[in-house]
Amino acid sequence: MFNSKTHRLEKLYQELKNCQKCPLALTRTQVVCGEGNINSNVFLIGLAPGKDEDKKGRMFVGRAGKVLDELLKKASLHRSYFYMSNLIKCMLPNNRPPKKDEIEACTSYLDEEIEIINPDILVPLGFFATKYIFSKYGISCKIEMNSICGKIFFAENKKIMPLHHPASLLYSPNLKSIMERTYIKLKNFL
Ligand code: URA
């Protein structure tokens, strides 16, 4: 069908692949588009591709992806259940934080994906994705990940459950049990 989700996403991915809206276009190998179950009710939002994702053009195929799969498995979930996309679609050099201009240049793509997928539940992973989603939906809550992860926030027609970004576990192994518990909260919520 002309206006189907697949058609709209294909058009969006095509546009994304040629994006030159910010200087990250000069340092990326390729844009990493969203992927997964386009009919899912749940949309996971990562931060940005890392080196492995930039090379392979797929989401969460590096170390953070392995952690994500393990956390999901522990909660009896699998990535194939979700649609997922990143806040920033191009690799951030040396895993540095995104700049304000880069976020501003890129988020219209994520907004469009949310509109097309139209999930009930948004799951921003980590600080930057949560900050953006909270501001998009007018939620004024301090973004203190340890206290908001696994909680449900209601906005417009969405439910939002922030979770720690899986890469946090690579830097802070002491977060393991709290992260496992919060990913299980997502499973229980579904
Ligand atoms: N981290 C992310 O946030 N997204 C990816 O696709 C890979 C690593």
Image (tube, rainbow, N blue to C red):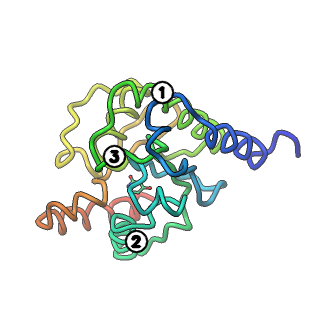
Whether residue 33 is situated above or below residue 176 in the rendered picture: above
Q: Measure how far apart labels 3 and 1 are at the Cα level.
A: 17 Å
What residue is pinned by disc 2? 69
Question: Which disc, if any, is residue 94?
Answer: none
* Label 2 SS: helix
* Label 1 SS: helix
| CB of mark 3 near ligand 1 (< 8 Å) | no
* In the displayed structure image, the side of residue 167 where residue 65 appears, left or right: right
- In this view of the protein, which residue sits in the foreground, 110 or 104? 104
Tell me which label, 3 or 1, sits earlier in the chain.
3
What residue is pinned by disc 3? 93
| CB of mark 1 near ligand 1 (< 8 Å) | no
Mark 3 Cα-neighbour bin, 10 Å: few <14, some 14–19, many ≥20? some
Residue at the extreme front of the image, as rendered: 26
| Residue 177 coordinates in the image, percent (x, y) | 18, 68
Residue at the spot 55% in from the left edge and 58% down from the top edge: 57
Q: Measure how far apart labels 3 and 2 are at the Cα level.
A: 24 Å
Q: Measure how far apart labels 1 and 2 are at the Cα level.
A: 29 Å
